[in-house]
Amino acid sequence: MGFPALLASALCTFLLPLLLFLAAVKLWDLYCVSGRDRSCPLPLPPGTMGLPFFGETLQMVLQRRKFLQMKRRKYGFIYKTHLFGRPTVRVMGAENVRHILLGEHRLVAVRWPASVRTILGSGCLSNLHDGQHKHRKKHYVPVIQEEVSACLGRWLGAAGPCLLVYPEVKRLMFRIAMRILLGFQPRQAGPDGERQLVEAFEEMIRNLFSLPIDVPFSGLYRGLRARNIIHAKIEENIRAKMARTEPEGGYKDALQLLMEHTQGNGEQLNMQELKESATELLFGGHETTASAATSLIAFLGLHHDVLQKVRKELQVKGLLCGSHQDKQLDMEVLEQLKYTGCVIKETLRLSPPVPGGFRIALKTLELNGYQIPKGWNVIYSICDTHDVADLFTDKDEFNPDRFMAPSPEDSSRFSFIPFGGGLRSCVGKEFAKVLLKIFTVELARSCDWQLLNGPPTMKTGPIVYPVDNLPTKFIGFSGQI
């Protein structure tokens, strides 16, 4: 075979498939763009729709923050893409986010990706749960303080040169969420049962944001299998609650309140809906607080001057002394710890546990000179909105004092949105605020620590966490500042 024949053969072998692939990508892009509203004169936002069917889901799942930063640099504060099987517009910036969140039920509605709805369930009772948290915080304080103190005692007594903070914090937050939100007592699961539940929950979370393909070994398949393990344990707990006349632990947990609310409205208890609501509560009250608490340890470990200012505030309130273990916290004391609250806010500004929120356009929207067609998904970005907020100066600096000075309410409302916003903000916002403040107090007055790998590299999957699990050496705090 001569050279011309070899060249022709090579072209057929490599060039033809490439041309077919490029043609498929172009046709896919045209198909997605054909969903624009022809009656609206505005163009679609800039952006690309990725590969046929898969869109840009694979790049986003694999690269996460790097992918999102690249998109922001290239397209600005609003761009189109195709994620989790749906055409999507991603928006950021206080003004754009304000438009989306204030349009709840009128312009947009909550709409999580199909894989999330399949695993967690399509129902959402977040508002009820969070409203109940606001009135029940005082009942949570002693339980949280008990669990945090016991955990820090184990850390200080741990053998070996270091402790991996992130998995330890996840176990702590899971125990707290199980007790307060679902009413599980420590003795109910035992160490093996607790470990099985934690592992199942982590497997479910890892596969929440996956392509909606339920076949063996797919992400959705693994997520559903883990979800079923969790549901079985929750159903066992619900049936035990239904058989009791008085709540265990002296207070009503969030699941008990939900059951009473349902029955009080004359509705029948639906076991599947209760299991889905309980799973949603665990997701909102465990994974996100574990992420935030880990970031707190990292930032305070890197900024000892901030830690000392926290301790100074505790000292002024009589919370930093040799017998602090006997000093019980309460809501009145916690609300007086203004600087400690600012440390938590600054942590959530720089490292929000959840990178964004999902909505669907109920009708064609006009936003910043572009159209968002009816039926398209809308993601408002929390992390990017914090990054670009004009409200903050020296954005990369960890500076809790920025929150000590009052800022105009309207401008800060959508520049700082770690819990989301609008009518459907974070399911466990009130619970998380109390938990993180107690955790910070107990940590500051019990421990000194050193980050063995220095500043951590953070990753999103789907919750923000340190790639190295934050190896840290803890020692007891002497009480001297």
Image (cartoon, grey):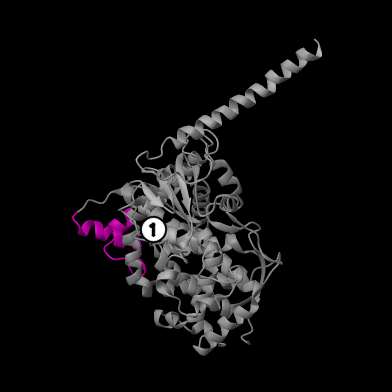
Q: Residues within 10 Å of mark 1 (few under 14, many from 20)?
A: some
In the rendered image, residue 141 lying in the magenta stretch gets the answer no
Task: Say whether residue 449 is left or right of residue 463.
Answer: right
Residue drawn at x 48%, y 63% as measured from the top left: 175
Residue drawn at x 37%, y 69% as measured from the top left: 249
Q: Dot 1 lies on which element?
A: helix
In-front residue for pair 312/156: 312
Quadrant of residue 141 in the image?
bottom left
Q: Which residue is mark 1?
A: 99
Residue 173 percent coordinates (x, y): 50, 63
Kind of residue sitting beneath label 1: His
Q: Which residues are magenta?
A: 239-266
In the rendered image, residue 253 lying in the magenta stretch gets the answer yes
Image height check: is 372 above or below 25?
below
In-front residue for pair 86/393: 393
Residue drawn at x 49%, y 53% as measured from the top left: 197
Residue drawn at x 35%, y 64% as measured from the top left: 130
Outermost residue toward the left in this view: 266
Residue 335 percent coordinates (x, y): 42, 80
Residue 402 percent coordinates (x, y): 53, 76
Image height check: is 293 above or below 225?
below
In-front residue for pair 339/383: 383
Task: Say whether residue 276 is left or right of residue 84.
Answer: left
- The image quadrant where one finds the C terminus is bottom right
Q: Is residue 250 visible?
A: no
Quadrant of residue 170 in the image?
bottom right
Q: Is residue 357 visible?
A: yes
Quadrant of residue 184 in the image?
bottom left
Residue 471 percent coordinates (x, y): 67, 63
Outermost residue toward the right in this view: 2
Q: Main secondary structure of the magenta part?
A: helix
